[in-house]
Amino acid sequence: MKPHRRIVNQPVVLLVEDEPLVRLTQVDILKESEFWVIEAQDADEAFELLKSRPEIDAILTDVDMPGSMDGFEFARLVRQGWPEVAVLVISGKTGPGPGDLPPNARFLHKPIMPDDLIAALQDVMARRPQKSLTPEA
């Protein structure tokens, strides 16, 4: 594990992708662009990570995954519980319908060029509300 100080200085992305080769490629793209990456193979695992990792700045999730929820449902859950976390949803099979994407989230169709992926991620991060520095009572 890399030193904790690296997380403080880099945006932290929770990558949710069930296909190992796709996930590996996306991890490489994100790391080359100076993101710290936490990986999950489905939305259920990602939800548990999100609850225990307050440093997460953004979610990059696929739509079609095994488990109890798809990427659209997970994106809406993230927006409800963590409004300060940016959300980018991607899929090569399914596009969003009315109400699938939460406010300020973006959707991209696979395949995605690396520069387009990073630009979309930076865009959703720029539009998110800032994290509160003080805990709420």
Image (cartoon, rainbow, N blue to C red):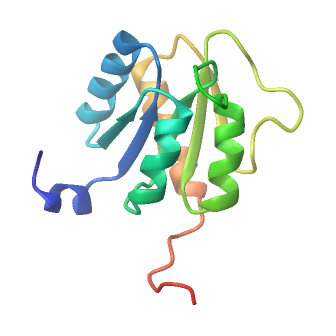
Instruction: Residue 118 in the image: state x and y as whole percent.
Output: 43, 34
Instruction: Residue 69 in the image: state x and y as whole percent.
Output: 67, 31
Q: Would residue 120 be found to the left or right of residue 33 on screen?
A: right
Residue appearing at x 48%, y 40% in the figure: 46
Q: Nearer the viewer, residue 105 or 81?
A: 81
> Which residue of the protein is positioned furthest toward the right in this rendering?
98
> Which residue of the protein is positioned furthest toward the front in this rendering?
68
> Which residue of the protein is positioned furthest toward the bottom in this rendering?
137
Q: Is residue 100 above or below residue 87?
A: above
Residue appearing at x 70%, y 33% in the figure: 72
Residue appearing at x 59%, y 59% in the figure: 128
Looking at the rendered image, the quarter that the C terminus falls into is: bottom right
Q: Nearer the viewer, residue 76 or 9?
A: 76
Quarter of the rendering containing residue 63 = top right
Q: Is residue 14 above or below residue 70?
A: below
Q: Would residue 54 be found to the left or right of residue 60 on screen?
A: left
Q: How many marks?
A: 0
Quarter of the rendering containing residue 81 = bottom right
Q: Would residue 56 be found to the left or right of residue 64 on screen?
A: left
Residue appearing at x 47%, y 52% in the figure: 50
Q: Nearer the viewer, residue 137 or 72?
A: 137
Looking at the rendered image, the quarter that the N terminus falls into is: top left
Instruction: Residue 74 in the image: state x and y as whole percent.
Output: 64, 40
